[in-house]
Image: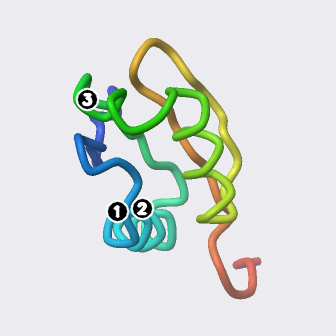
Amino acid sequence: MLLEPAVRIGKNGLTPAVIREIDALLDKRKLVKIKLLKSSMETAEKQQLITAAAKETGALLVQSAGMTFALYREAPGPRPK
């Protein structure tokens, strides 16, 4: 199964609204694929955006290829047995 990018970061960069969206998706899915649009490179370097997204959401960077990256975060709450 191919995971499509669920979030796109554009010219406004990593805004609080984008962070909230990524955070909500991580709560729901655990794994989120994010695409950086070329316009996002005007506000910051690619690696800076990726690092900031992971740090702000408390997620782990699991893959980065080209302008796309994936973040993973364990689901909140107790684990099912």
Q: Residue at x 30, y 43 (%)?
A: 9
Disc 1 marks a residue whose amino acid type is Val
Q: Quadrant of residue 63?
A: top right
Reading the image, the residue beneath label 1 is: 18
Disc 2 marks a residue whose amino acid type is Ile
Reading the image, the residue beneath label 3 is: 37
Mark 1 surroundings within 10 Å by alpha-carbon count, few (fewer than 14), some (14 through 19), many (20 or more): some
From the viewer's side, name the closer residue of 51 and 73: 51
Q: Residue at x 49, y 64 (%)?
A: 26
From the viewer's side, name the closer residue of 38 and 81: 38
Pick whichever of labels 3 and 2 is earlier in the sequence: 2
For the residue labelled by badge 3, is the local secondary structure a helix, a strand or a loop?
loop
Tag 1 near tag 2, CB within 8 Å: yes
For the residue labelled by badge 1, is the local secondary structure a helix, a strand or a loop?
helix
Q: Quadrant of the C terminus?
A: bottom right
Q: Position of residue 36 (x, y in %)?
A: 34, 32
Q: Residue at x 65, y 42 (%)?
A: 51
Q: Quadrant of residue 76?
A: bottom right
Question: What separation in Å lies between label 3 and label 1 (alpha carbons)?
Answer: 13 Å
Q: Quadrant of the N terminus?
A: top left
